[in-house]
Amino acid sequence: MEATTAQLIAQFRSVAGQFCDLIENCSSCSRAKFVKLAHGLLADLYRMGALLPHVELDSDDATRDRVSHEQWSKVYKAISEKLGDAAGYWTVFDPADPADKEAIQHTLADDLSDIYRDLRSALPASETDILSNDGLWDMRFQYEHHWGAHAVSALRTMHSLLYGPSYLAED
């Protein structure tokens, strides 16, 4: 049975809230558990992000309460400390561009903190608050143009950490 748009949005909000809570409280679990939980939530978010409906903006000025740079920095630092030596990985900036062949180093902390910022900035403050068309539009836009790409990179890296030759041992 296919979920209705309202059900999909509610599920997305729930998983996005769980992801943001995990990121905000990353110091409360082991590194391996954090990566495993983040991997599962991010896989769900990515799938549901692709299913978010396209909507029109309600206003010409879709301003939102953004996560400040200071808040983002605090989250980035906490994730970096949690991941330690498992934070870095190598990738190409645009894998679909045949001319882009130079590997760059990136970090899971940047991926996860950027995803957190986009989601937390678009989610209403309370679970009972209505997600406006502007908020929904922003979630879909950020999925297509920012956090979706971070999610794919983070998922691949966390998959390798959890199941590949450089696996994380349970701490």
Image (cartoon, helix red, strand yellow):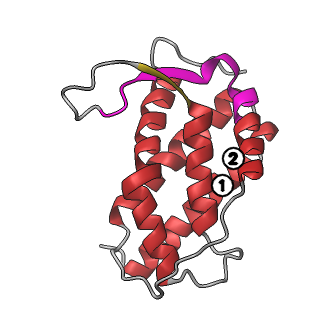
Residue type at mark 2 is Ile
In the rendered image, residue 80 lying in the magenta stretch gets the answer yes
- Give the residues drawn in magenta, as a range: 79-94
| Residue 108, percent from left and from top | 57, 32
Q: Is residue 30 above or below residue 60?
A: above
Whether label 2 touches label 1, CB < 8 Å: yes
User: What is the x, y in percent for residue 23?
Assistant: 69, 47
Residue in the image at 28% along x and 31% along y: 95
Relative to 53, does residue 68 appear above or below in the rendering? Answer: above
> Which residue is label 1 attached to?
20
Residue occupied by mark 2: 23
Q: Residue 141 placed where, x, y %?
A: 41, 64
Q: Quadrant of the C terminus?
A: top right
Q: Is residue 5 magenta?
A: no
- Which residue is outermost to the front? 61
Q: Nearer the viewer, residue 51 or 93?
A: 93
Secondary structure of the residue carrying tag 1 is helix
